[in-house]
Image (cartoon, rainbow, N blue to C red):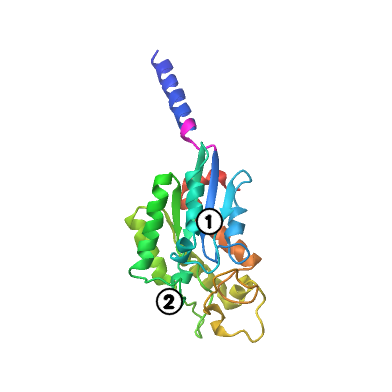
C-alpha cells in the first residue's frame, strides 16, 4: 500500500514538472555591433541552438544602453516579450558597453551614473514579462600594446555590469574576462585573423579604437568587429558559458 502511494506521488510530481517545463524557447539577442548580424557573434550563437529554438538577433551596430532605448528598439523587444506564446520560455541576452564609452555623441553614457541606471532599467522592464535576462559584459577588443599585452579599456564597463547584475540578482556571463584571456593567449597575429577583413600590410595600431558609427560595420579590418572566424570563436565561448549560468538551456543547445 505504501509503495503504491509513493509511486502515485512520483507520477503526480513528474506530471507537474512536465507541465511547468516550457514546450518551446525563444532567445532574443540585444546589444551592439559585436553581437549584431554581419559584424558580431550573434548569428553564429543562434546557430548553436537546436533548430526548434527561435533565436532573434536584434542587436544593432553603434547602439548603447541609451540609444537602443531612445530609438525605439527596446520597445520592439518588449512588445515581443509581452506577446509570448503559451508554453514558451523567453531568454534575453544583453551586452552593452562599447558605445557607452566617451566620445560618441548621442550614445555615450556616464559610467558612474547613466550606464548602471540604464542597465537597471532594462532589468526592471523584463521582470514583469516573465522572460529571463542574462547580462553579458562587453566583448574584448583585440588591440595589443608594444609589450605584447592585450589592452582592456572596456573593463570598467564590464565591472559596472557585474555590479548591476549582482545587485538585481540577474545571471551574468563575464564575456569580457573570458574573451580577453582567450585573445591574450592566442596573440596578436592569430587575433587579427578574427576580423571582418584581412589585415592590410600597413594597418595602424589604432584601428581598433576608432569611434564606431551608428550603423552596420563596414567590412574592413579593425580589431573590434568580427568576421566569420571570429564569430565562431566567440559564439562558442558564449554557448559554453551560457549553459553554466543557466543550466536549463543545455537541452536546447546542439
* Span colored in magenta: 19-23
Residue found 52% across the figure and 65% down from its top: 32
Whether label 2 touches label 1, CB < 8 Å: no
Magenta region, main secondary structure? loop
Residue found 43% across the figure and 45% down from its top: 129
User: Which quadrant holds residue 188?
Assistant: bottom right
Decide whether residue 228 is among the magenta residues: no
Looking at the rendered structure, the number of numbered marks drawn on it comes to 2
**Toward the viewer: 120 or 240?**
120
Please identify the quadrant where the N terminus is shown: top left
The residue that disc 2 covers is 102
Q: What element carries label 2?
A: loop
Residue 197 drawn at (x, y percent): 66, 74
User: Which quadrant holds residue 155?
Assistant: bottom left
The residue that disc 1 covers is 29
Picture layout, residue 234 above or below residue 28: below
Residue 211 drawn at (x, y percent): 52, 77
**Toward the viewer: 178 or 204?**
204
- First of labels 2, 1 by sequence position: 1
Residue found 43% across the figure and 65% down from its top: 66
Q: Is residue 178 left or right of 53 when viewed as pictured? A: left
Amino acid at each position: 500500500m505504501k509503495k503504491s502511494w509513493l509511486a502515485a506521488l512520483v507520477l503526480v510530481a513528474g506530471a507537474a514538472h512536465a507541465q511547468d517545463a516550457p514546450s518551446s524557447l525563444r532567445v532574443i539577442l540585444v546589444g551592439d555591433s559585436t553581437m549584431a548580424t554581419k559584424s558580431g557573434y550573434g548569428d553564429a550563437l543562434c546557430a548553436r541552438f537546436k533548430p526548434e529554438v527561435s533565436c532573434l538577433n536584434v542587436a544593432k551596430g553603434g547602439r548603447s544602453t541609451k540609444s537602443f532605448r531612445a530609438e525605439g528598439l527596446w520597445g520592439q523587444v518588449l512588445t515581443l516579450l509581452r506577446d509570448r506564446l503559451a508554453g514558451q520560455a523567453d531568454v534575453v541576452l544583453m551586452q552593452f558597453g562599447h558605445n557607452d564609452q566617451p566620445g560618441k555623441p548621442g550614445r555615450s553614457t556616464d559610467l558612474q551614473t547613466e550606464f548602471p541606471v540604464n542597465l537597471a532599467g532594462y532589468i526592471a522592464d523584463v521582470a514583469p514579462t516573465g522572460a529571463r535576462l542574462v547580462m553579458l559584459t562587453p566583448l574584448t577588443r583585440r588591440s595589443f600594446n608594444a609589450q605584447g599585452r592585450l589592452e582592456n579599456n572596456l573593463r570598467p564597463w564590464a565591472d559596472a555590469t557585474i555590479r548591476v547584475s549582482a545587485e538585481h540578482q540577474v545571471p551574468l556571463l563575464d564575456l569580457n574576462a573570458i574573451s580577453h584571456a582567450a585573445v591574450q593567449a592566442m596573440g596578436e597575429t592569430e587575433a587579427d585573423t578574427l576580423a571582418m577583413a584581412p589585415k592590410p600590410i600597413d594597418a595602424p595600431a589604432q584601428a581598433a579604437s576608432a569611434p564606431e558609427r551608428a550603423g552596420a560595420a563596414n567590412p574592413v579590418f579593425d580589431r573590434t568587429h568580427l568576421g566569420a572566424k571570429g564569430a565562431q570563436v566567440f559564439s562558442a565561448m558564449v554557448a559554453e558559458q551560457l549553459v553554466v549560468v543557466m543550466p536549463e538551456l543545455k537541452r536546447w543547445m546542439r
